[in-house]
Image (cartoon, rainbow, N blue to C red):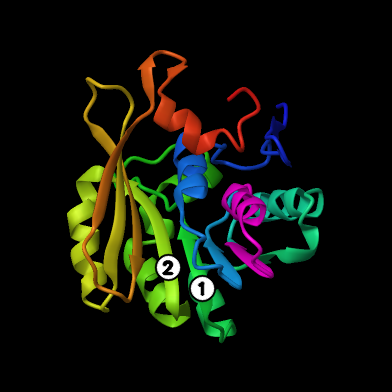
Amino acid sequence: MKPFKFKEFTVHQERCAMKIGTDGVLLGAWTSVEHNPYNVLDIGSGTGILSLMIAQRSHADQIEAIEIDDDAFEQCVENFENSPWADRLFCFHASLLEYIEAVDEKFDLIICNPPFYTEDYKTKDSARDLARFSDAMPLEHIIFAVINFLSEKGKFSIVLPYKDEQKYIEEASLIDLFPNRILRVRGNEKSDIKRSLIEFSYSECPIKISELIIETERHHYTEDYINLTKDFYLKM
């Protein structure tokens, strides 16, 4: 498999169960860094794409990623070492709960592109199952991590299926995390909303809700999508 080349870095992904997709790129481009985070935590890093995008977009001194899968962890480390920001990027081979037990630190930005699938169905590829199925990283565990790790001024950014948006907002409110921005994503004008990108913080304020349509037709991208991703995709 050929590596995925972005404008400022390259991502190898042949050893990762979950390949680079639109969800991760959108979250990496959309997540706010205007509060100048000093340190960043990437929960379930996979290839490391989110950490690499935040490294390109911000001056964060320390970007830490957690990855439980052996092959994905090794690939993430390789991608970090080969990037222009190797001195700022660190990947830990641990489960989320192991990391919570081991690390006592607050982060100004937490990002997560979590597994979505909660169906009973499993494939024969255990690594892909681990990456794709929510039982490997329940959303409740992510909220538990945010309680432990988010600094007072920090922001927590996540991408979810649209159908889970309200439920997750309600769960986050139980620990006084409030949605500040929401981006709802459609594949095209006629398709249903598929994803919600949500940015939380401890500050309650009017929610800025916007919508993004990716394509006008197959491989013809909207101006909004191009503007959001043009700093990364080679052909934008």
Q: Residue at x 28, y 36 (%)?
A: 194
Q: Is residue 149 above or below residue 196?
A: below
Q: Residue at x 20, y 45 (%)?
A: 163
Check the picture and name the quadrant holding the C terminus: top right
**Quadrant in the picture for residue 66:** bottom right
- Confirm whether residue 120 shows in the render: no
On the image, numbered disc 1 is attached to which residue? Answer: 108
Q: Depth check: 55 or 168 in front?
A: 55
- For the residue labelled by badge 2, is the local secondary structure a helix, a strand or a loop? strand
Q: Amino acid at mark 2?
A: Lys
Q: Is 54 in the magenta?
A: yes
Q: Residue at x 61, y 73 (%)?
A: 38
Q: Is 110 in the magenta?
A: no
Magenta segment, which residues?
Answer: 47-66
On the image, numbered disc 2 is attached to which residue? Answer: 155
Check contact, mark 1 vs mark 2: CB within 8 A. Answer: yes
**Quadrant in the picture for residue 204:** bottom left
